[in-house]
Amino acid sequence: MSQQDDRATYLSIVTLCDDFTYDSDAAEDYYQLYLPDDDQPHGYMLTDIVKQMPWTSEFTVRHDHPRSVTVLDNSHGEDTASAINDAFAGLVNNCIDRKLFGSLDGRHSESCTIVSAKYDQPVHVERFAAALFGLTQRGAHLVAYTNDAEIGMKLWIPRRSAHLYTCPGMLDTTVAGGVKSGSSPFLTIIEEAQEEASLPEMLVRQHARSRGAISHLSLTGKGFRGEQGLVVPDFIYVYDMELPSDVVPKPCDNEVGEFNCMSIEEVQAALLNGEFKPDSAAVLIDFLIRHSFIIPENEPDFVEISMRLHRRLPFRVLA
């Protein structure tokens, strides 16, 4: 995801999250990742990553076209899901022990479900490792706002803490997080709302509303401190929550520096100034469209923006 220039538009902001080419032949430039007994690919891997990866006997790598990496089922059909999970876990452990790949940040991370897999039991991989394999990732974002008859709508916008690995110091949606294995999008919102914004579960259950999902296919770039050019298929469940006027989000963990209540005009200016984390910027543009602040009459790229916010991913989605 590359950085925005001085002439940012809503379309250019969305393109930051959807910068993988639409050329149908692009897959030939990558190794395609396959799971056992499945002829559909699950990810695109960079050649450099494939070369550096300390492959184990649970994987086969094919270097002639079409190039591929395939996870083997060492259970011979008795417990395929566990065989896949063990294969990824052993490989990622080895990478961390050997301090390979900046994306892993030298540490383990929570597991996330491989949403393209179709087995009786879930399969998963550590979240920091997902981009190395080009696997589809899931997130959940919530935008909290207030409505005043005289002032109008204002959004609660946090600034990310300066120590964070990804996009430190940038603006964000009110609450956001990756959907962990065994969890759900709404449970993710409930947990993150408490951890990041001190918003109690009962309040979130009462006021938060699901508003759909957005999707994009991006490449890691300057805003990412790990390997560059990794393919990141991603979809985000989006939620809105109108807060009572006396409720003020407050940082609870160390991931948020501060919250500010910003007018729509202030949010739009910050978006166009490149102050938001790229995927959060896309969520907010979707919010502005759904609440009729961005409409066909004031945005010449309205249709293109709407389509780019809902890209059809090249991999199966079973979530």
Image: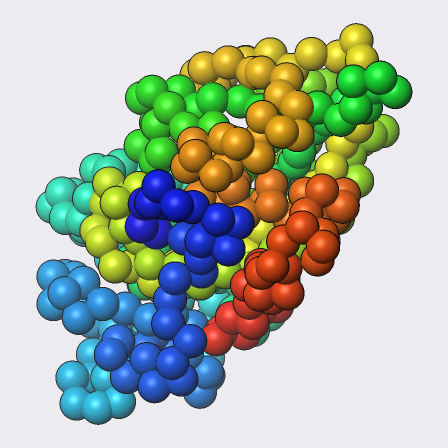
Towards the viewer: 38 or 307: 307
- Could you tell me residue 10's position as x and y percent? 53, 49
Identify the image quadrant of residue 310: bottom right
- Could you tell me residue 266's position as x and y percent? 58, 26
Q: Is residue 80 left or right of residue 197?
A: left
Q: Is residue 96 visible?
A: no
Residue under the point 35% across and 41% down? 6
Q: Is residue 268 visible?
A: yes
Towards the viewer: 83 or 266: 266
Colour approach in the figure = rainbow
Q: Residue furthest top?
A: 246
- Could you tell me residue 210's position as x and y percent? 76, 45
Q: Is residue 84 left or right of residue 30?
A: right
- Image mark count: 0
Which image quarter is the C terminus in? bottom right
Towards the viewer: 28 or 53: 28
Q: Is 203 situated above or below 279?
A: above
Q: Is 15 situated above or below 102?
A: below
Towards the viewer: 55 or 210: 210
Identify the image quadrant of residue 309: bottom right
Q: Is 166 situated above or below 283?
A: above
Q: Residue furthest bottom?
A: 65
- Could you tell me residue 130's position as x and y percent? 37, 55
Residue under the point 43% across and 24% down? 160
Q: Is residue 249 left or right of residue 27?
A: right
Residue under the point 84% across and 17% down? 150
Identify the image quadrant of residue 176: top right
Residue under the point 76% across and 46% down? 292
